[in-house]
Image (cartoon, rainbow, N blue to C red):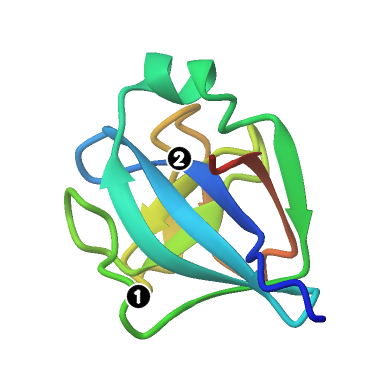
């Protein structure tokens, strides 16, 4: 009998436009593919209490067509800061971005293959 339990984690992110924290629900499929399916506003204190920053996921990161995007600005992409490892929403167009967490500026390039996450209960 096949195990029908779906592996789901929450990624903690910040809105690049409004500097507000939100969670991204990531669902594992095919072992090494993670799909963003939902996003929701969350207080940082609640996110840390829920340990949404305590696990790491590896593999291909993409988003389901039904993913609503950032709950504050509706951006449907993310970037990972190479300075502080924070995840932020991203409009998908800008070539240079500024991290809302550490204010590091950098060029958007490549693919995200690893993210810090917490288990969804």
What percent of the width, then of the height, locates residue 116? 67, 42
To which residue does mark 1 refer?
A: 93
Quarter of the image for residue 3 reads bottom right
Where residue 27 sits: x, y (%)?
Answer: 57, 66
* Camera sees residue 1: yes
The N terminus lies in quadrant? bottom right
Mark 1 lies on a secondary structure that is loop
Question: Where is mark 2, residue-wise?
Answer: 99
Q: In this rendering, is residue 11 above or below 27?
A: above
Counting from the top left corner in percent of width and height, residue 36 is at 48, 67
Write down the quadrant of residue 51 in the picture: top right
Q: Residue 92 location, x and y as percent?
A: 38, 73
Disc 1 + disc 2, Cβ < 8 Å = no
Q: How many marks?
A: 2
Q: Nearer the viewer, residue 81 or 94?
A: 81
Q: Residues within 10 Å of mark 1 (few under 14, many from 20)?
A: few
Asked whether residue 110 is in view, the answer is: no
The residue that appears at 33% across and 54% down in the rendered structure is 39
Q: Is residue 47 left or right of residue 93?
A: right
In three-dimensional space, the C-alpha distance between marks 1 and 2, rounded to whole angstroms, equals 15 Å
Mark 1 or mark 2: name the one nearer the start of the chain.
1
Q: Is residue 71 above or below residue 28?
A: above
**Looking at the rendered structure, which numbered label has been put on residue 25?**
none
Q: Is residue 32 above or below residue 73?
A: below
Dot 2 falls on a residue whose secondary structure is loop
Q: Which residue is at the far front?
A: 1
């Amino acid at each position: 009998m096949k195990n029908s339990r779906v592996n789901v984690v929450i990624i903690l992110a910040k809105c690049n436009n409004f500097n507000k924290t939100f969670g991204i629900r990531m669902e594992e499929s095919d072992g090494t593919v993670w799909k963003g399916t939902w996003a929701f506003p969350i207080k940082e204190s609640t996110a840390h209490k829920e340990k949404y920053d305590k696990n790491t996921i590896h593999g291909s990161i993409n988003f389901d067509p039904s993913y609503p995007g950032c709950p504050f600005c509706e951006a449907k992409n993310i970037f990972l800061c190479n300075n502080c490892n924070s995840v932020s929403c991203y409009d998908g167009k800008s070539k240079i971005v500024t991290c809302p967490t550490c204010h590091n500026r950098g060029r958007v390039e490549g693919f995200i293959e690893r993210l810090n996450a917490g288990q969804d209960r």
